[in-house]
Image (cartoon, rainbow, N blue to C red):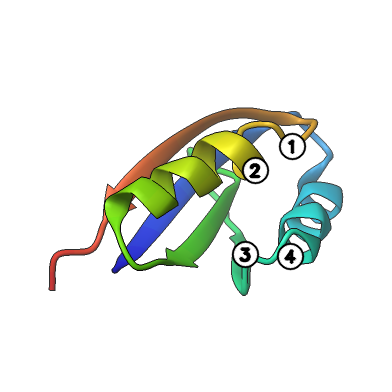
């Protein structure tokens, strides 16, 4: 199961937060231009694991303001 997490962060902290998320074990974190600042790709066995990672890791990263999680369906 895969999820895309759209992340809004504090201004000027893109590279720092991208590195922190990569160091936390997320294999893909890209900086974006537009409404969202970063997108993280999470692969997990089930939706609960995705939720635990989003809430327990991404949302607790200093500088992260908000997240939107999109579950892939195909």
Query: Disc 2 on helix, strand or loop?
Result: helix
| In this rendering, the label closer to the viewer, 2 or 3 | 2
Residue 35 vs 41, above or below: the answer is above
Q: Earlier in the sequence, mark 1 or mark 4?
A: 4
Q: Position of residue 54 (x, y in %)?
A: 51, 43
Q: Which residue is mark 4?
A: 22
Q: CA distance from mark 2 to mark 4?
A: 11 Å
| In this rendering, the label closer to the viewer, 1 or 3 | 1
| Number of disc labels | 4
Residue 12 vs 1, above or below: the answer is above
On screen, residue 69 versus residue 6, left or right, reads left
Q: Which residue is mark 3?
A: 29
On screen, residue 12 versus residue 1, left or right, reads right
For residue 12, the mark is: none
Q: Which residue is mark 2?
A: 57
State the residue in front, 18 or 12: 18
Q: Earlier in the sequence, mark 4 or mark 3?
A: 4
Q: Quadrant of residue 58?
A: top right
Q: Quadrant of residue 63?
A: top right
Query: Disc 3 on helix, strand or loop?
Result: strand
Q: CA distance from mark 2 to mark 3?
A: 13 Å
| Residue occupying the point 72% across, 56% down | 21
Disc 3: CA contacts within 10 A as few (<14), some (14-19) or many (>=20): many
| Residue occupying the point 29% across, 69% down | 1
Query: Disc 4 on helix, strand or loop?
Result: helix
Q: Are marks 2 and 1 in contact (CB under 8 Å)?
A: yes
Q: Position of residue 70 (x, y in %)?
A: 30, 50
Q: Are marks 4 and 3 in contact (CB under 8 Å)?
A: yes
Q: Are marks 2 and 3 in contact (CB under 8 Å)?
A: no
Q: Position of residue 44 (x, y in %)?
A: 40, 66
Q: CA distance from mark 1 to mark 3?
A: 14 Å
Query: Disc 1 on helix, strand or loop?
Result: loop
């Amino acid at each position: 199961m895969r999820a895309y997490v759209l992340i809004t962060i504090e201004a000027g902290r893109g590279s720092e937060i991208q590195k922190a998320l990569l160091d936390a074990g997320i294999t893909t974190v890209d900086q974006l231009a537009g409404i969202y600042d970063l997108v993280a790709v999470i692969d997990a066995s089930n939706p609960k694991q995705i939720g635990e990672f989003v809430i327990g890791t991404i949302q607790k990263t200093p500088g992260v303001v908000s997240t939107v999680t999109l579950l892939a369906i195909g």
